[in-house]
Image (tube, rainbow, N blue to C red):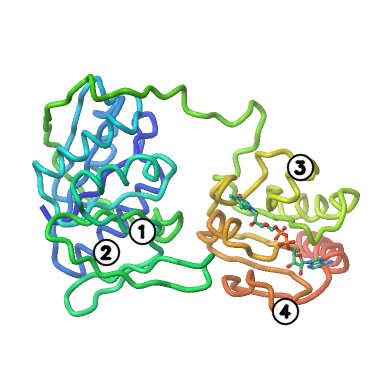
Amino acid sequence: MDILVALENNSGSIHRMSLEALAAGQKLASEMNLSLSMLAMGKNGGDLAENAGKFNAEEVLLLENPLLDNYSSDGYSQAITSVLEQEKPRFVFMGHTYMVRDFLPRVSARLQIPFVSDVIQFRIDDGAPVFTKQVFNAKLGADIVSQSKGATLVSFQSAAYQSDQAEAGAAAIRSISIEMDSSAVKTQSEEPFKEEAGGVDLTNAEIIVSIGRGIGKEENIPIVNALVDALGAELGSSRPIVDSGWLEPSRQIGSSGQNVAPKLYLALGISGAIQHVVGMKGSKNIVAINKDSEAPIFEIADYGIVGDILEIIPKLSEAVQAAKN
Ligand SMILES: Cc1cc2nc3c(=O)[nH]c(=O)nc-3n(C[C@H](O)[C@H](O)[C@H](O)COP(=O)(O)OP(=O)(O)OC[C@H]3O[C@@H](n4cnc5c(N)ncnc54)[C@H](O)[C@@H]3O)c2cc1C
């Protein structure tokens, strides 16, 4: 086996970041002529495998074991370690989720194999994949080539690859089993965290108007609401706005908020700190307005406007309204 994409189980459906890892895996498979399989495990693993079978891969390995029904870092690391020993893939691809950050380093330590984490892209050089990850608070990109004799574990940053680029197809399901030592599973997870009742789900929004500290004060938010209404958008924000109590936590976008990928993302008075950018850089079109022409947000923006949002937003709302009438 060449590439194994280990899927994160969202109650039987595929986690968005696993689909992004699959898109990356399919790209590597096609560029290096490698085979690709997926691994489905956890509660409702059969449903997960069935969903995975609708994508282009050689096969989907289905691992069912009651010890894996609920997530535990010791259980999951034990299971993946055994699967790797059994199936011997060269590369294991996953999304860089909280769960992966929790258990995959253990697999790396147990098998003494490299874990290249939070990768943003790869290219092929001299017949080998070169993985790039950001270092020094995203100021530099580090290129990493694995020298591993066994597998190489790779996790991808959110939106590094697009989930809608995962190629559809038909993959056969193969059930596998491993020996698991129940006494080695010492931790038990609580129910997965759920957003507070009534919290907004920005992940399916097509247009997001997002405000940052540049909005100045809470009293200025109604100006933005007019633009949100005119565009039929959802309102999002950077973390300082939520920390100030001006918007509810479910509107925060970024590494400790929601991960979004709308068709249009308007970043208003947002500097573009890495913790914000990881949550929105998968947006199809990014428009940034900032009075500082050097603001890092312009590096990822498709369209940039240097100016004062408090002057521009009302004019933009008027223009959108006029265009609609
Ligand atoms: C562990 C950790 C997790 C974090 N998680 C998140 C997260 O999930 N989401 C998140 O967003 N941040 C997160 N942060 C915080 C992050 O590091 C930044 O501090 C934050 O994103 C900055 O928000 P901002 O861009 O709104 O504010 P600032 O960085 O202060 O930027 C404000 C911008 O507004 C511009 N501006 C000011 N006035 C105007 C005006 N009138 N018109 C136009 N532009 C104007 C300024 O030029 C500036 O670029 C996290 C930090 C840590 C340490």
**In the rendered image, which residue does mark 3 sit on?**
247
Q: Which residue does the image show at 79% across and 41% down from the upper left?
A: 245
In x, y percent, where is residue 121? 37, 67
Relative depth, front residue between 31 and 238: 238
In the image, is 80 to the left or to the right of 314?
left
Q: Amino acid at mark 1?
A: Gln
Look at 32% across and 49% down and name the residue there. Answer: 94
Q: Earlier in the sequence, mark 2 or mark 1?
A: 2
* Percent coordinates x, y for residue 324 in the rendering: 76, 59
Q: Of the residues tagged 3 and 1, which is closer to the observer?
A: 3
Mark 1 residue element:
helix
Q: Mark 2 sits on what residue?
A: 27
Mark closer to the chain start, 4 or 3? 3
Calculate the distance from the C-alpha at mark 4 to the C-alpha at mark 3: 27 Å
Circle nearer the viewer, 4 or 2: 4
Residue 302 placed where, x, y %? 59, 73
Query: Looking at the image, is mark 2 or mark 3 nearer the viewer?
Result: 3
Vertical order, 169 against 147 (above or below): above
- Please tell me whether mark 2 or mark 1 is closer to you in this view: 2
Work out how far the residue at label 4 is from the one at label 2, CA to CA, in angstroms.
36 Å
Q: How many marks?
A: 4
Above or below residue 47? Residue 205 is below
Indicate the amino acid at tag 2: Lys
Residue 1's spot in the image, x, y percent? Answer: 10, 52
As measured in the structure, the alpha-carbon distance from the residue carrying label 1 to the one carrying label 4 is 33 Å
Residue at which label 4 appears:
293
> Of callouts 4 and 2, which one flags the residue occurring earlier in the amino acid sequence?
2
**Other residues around mark 4 within 10 Å, as few (<14) / some (14–19) / many (≥20):** few
The C terminus sits in image quarter = bottom right
